[in-house]
Structure formats: C-alpha cells, structure tokens
C-alpha cells in the first residue's frame, strides 16, 4: 500500500468501523431499518445513508440533486441541510438496495485507499466547500464513521467497539475540542484548571489549563487544586460530546467536584458535533 504512514491509522479505523457496520446490517429485517437511533431525527436507514454519503464524498462523487422536504424539524442549519441531502435521497430505499450500495461504495473506497499516494498535507474539498488537508479529512471521516457505528449499535442493542481503532481516533478528536469548550464556551476563570477523569474501555486523565489571557490548553499532567473535576465513563463522554444525550439524562453517570456553576456550564456546552 502506498498510503502515507501518517494516514494509515485513519484508514485502519475506517476499515474496522465500516466492516462492523456491514456485519451489523446483514441480519436485519426490513422493519429494523426504521429503528430510531440516538442521532437526532435519524433511523438506522438514515445513518447508513449518511455513512454511504460520506464515503461518496471522499470518493469525489457528485452530490445528489435533490430538494429537501420542509418538515424535517431536526434540520436547523446549513451544515445539517448539507448532510441531510445524502440521507433524504435514500429514505425510500429497501434494505437490499442499502446493503448493495454500501458494499459497492466500500469496494471503491478500499481501491481508493490502496492507490492513495498523496501527501497528508494535500488540500482537499470538505463539507460546504471548505478546504482542509487530506490528513484532517481522513481523521474526521474515521471519527464520523465510528460515531455512527455506535449509533447503530445503540439502536440495535449490539454494544461493542468502544476500544476499537476508531474509538482512539474519536478520543483525540474530542480531546482537541476540550480547550475551546472549557475556556471559550464555559468561560472558565482565568489562571484555572479543569480535570477530566475518564474510565472504561478508553481511559485518560487530562487537564485543561486556562491562562491569564483566557486561552485553554490541553495537558496530560494532573492539576493540583483544580477549579473543577469531572469523572465519567468513556461511553457517556462520547454520547455527551456527540449530542446523543443531555447532561440531565446521564447525571447519575457523571461525578462533578469543585465549582458547580463551572461544571454545569461545561456540560451544557459539551456537545462539539453539528
């Protein structure tokens, strides 16, 4: 394979998740494709449509020409409208049509990855015409497909893959958002620290330090006398960060210490996906 070593972890994560999704879908009856997932407004079919659409975008396929209905109340911004297009265009597809299209797209993506020789810094097109590096595009893609694998597992009652390659990509993506959540969104006091203690299949202890200018940085060193500490399990961390649950519904799974106003503000702004 000619894939750059920097990109290999993201290709491995995508491969693991997409194979898991394919396996989850094989035994499903037609009615099970309509099950609700934790992803707001989306069924199992919708999530799979989205995953297919994401991979079509990675392949550079033209986007579908389609007009969205006006009654999709979960669609409230341009980013959601952009993502919904690939979903709504497949809403009436049968289970065999969905699995066949997914299988074909996966074959094409595997071929693309085998032949991928571009530098990680190569600029590529992202959602809504945004320009980003190939490395960031593949990183975001591996993250998204793993999160949607988890959506499907929750909907189908088939938990798993919480420590898979995609889970570790997700950890790094979500940790990268924490300084902004704590310092900018939750407005943590300047010259303070907030500790996140996460246990479970993926474990980590991280500190967000807020400097005198109000900028947040992510550190692995524990803080002495932090302003606040949040302790929770990995699955709850993911669900909160991806907007699959509200802080109120998982209050019994999140332990907070220190400044309660600050921990409330952090949890209120914890969702980082659109």
Image (cartoon, grey):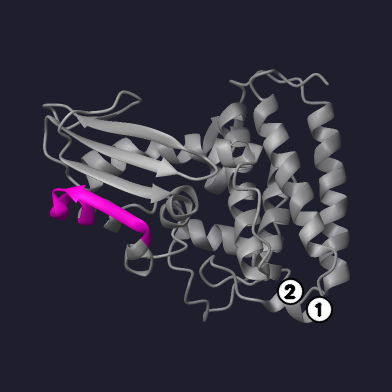
Does residue 26 sit above or below 166 in this rendering?
A: below
x, y percent for residue 200: 50, 45
Q: Is residue 11 left or right of residue 172?
A: right
Residue at 48% in and 72% down: 74
x, y percent for residue 138: 63, 35
Which residue is labeled 1 in the image?
A: 30
Q: Quadrant of the C terminus?
A: bottom left
Please check the rendered image and state whether residue 258 is part of the magenta-colored stretch, yes or no: yes
Tell me the element at label 1. Answer: helix
Q: Is residue 187 left or right of residue 154?
A: left
Q: Quadrant of the N terminus?
A: top right
Tell me where the magenta segment starts and ends, as one range.
253-264
Query: Are circles 1 and 2 on residues that touch, CB within 8 Å?
Result: yes
Q: Residues within 10 Å of mark 1 (few under 14, many from 20)?
A: few
Does residue 151 sit above or below 196 in this rendering?
A: below
Please check the rendered image and state whether residue 73 is part of the magenta-colored stretch, yes or no: no
Q: CA distance from mark 1 to mark 2?
A: 6 Å
Q: Is residue 266 left or right of residue 57?
A: left
**Mark on residue 42?**
none
Residue 229 appears in the picture as rendered: yes
Does residue 137 sit above or below 39 in this rendering?
A: above
Residue at 60% in and 75% down: 36
Tell me the element at label 2. Answer: helix
Which residue is labeled 2 in the image?
A: 33
Residue 86 appears in the picture as rendered: no
x, y percent for residue 28: 81, 71
Q: Residues within 10 Å of mark 2 (few under 14, many from 20)?
A: many
Residue at 54% in and 32% down: 132
x, y percent for residue 112: 81, 34
């Amino acid at each position: 394979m000619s894939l750059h070593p920097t990109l290999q972890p993201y290709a491995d994560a995508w491969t693991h998740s997409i194979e898991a999704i394919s396996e989850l879908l094989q035994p499903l009856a037609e009615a099970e494709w309509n099950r609700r997932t934790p992803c707001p407004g989306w069924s199992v079919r919708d999530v799979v449509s989205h995953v297919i659409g994401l991979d079509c975008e990675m392949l550079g396929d033209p986007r579908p020409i389609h007009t969205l209905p006006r009654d999709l109340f979960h669609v409230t911004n341009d980013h959601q409208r952009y993502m919904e297009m690939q979903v709504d265009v497949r809403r009436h597809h049968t289970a065999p049509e969905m699995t066949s299209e997914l299988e074909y797209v996966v074959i094409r993506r595997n071929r693309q990855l085998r032949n991928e020789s571009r530098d990680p810094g190569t600029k590529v097109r992202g959602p809504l015409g945004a320009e980003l590096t190939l490395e960031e595009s593949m990183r975001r893609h591996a993250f998204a497909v793993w999160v949607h694998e988890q959506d499907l597992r929750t909907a189908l009652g088939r938990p798993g893959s919480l420590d898979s390659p995609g889970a570790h990509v997700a950890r790094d993506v979500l940790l990268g958002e924490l300084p902004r959540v704590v310092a900018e969104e939750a407005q943590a006091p300047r010259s303070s620290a907030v500790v996140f203690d996460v246990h479970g299949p993926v474990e980590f202890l991280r500190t967000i330090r807020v400097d005198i200018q109000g900028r947040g940085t992510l550190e692995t060193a524990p803080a002495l006398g932090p302003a606040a500490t949040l302790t929770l399990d990995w699955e709850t961390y993911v669900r909160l960060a991806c907007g699959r649950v509200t802080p109120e519904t998982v209050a019994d799974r999140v332990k907070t210490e220190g400044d309660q106003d600050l921990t409330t503000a952090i949890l209120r702004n914890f969702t980082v996906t659109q």
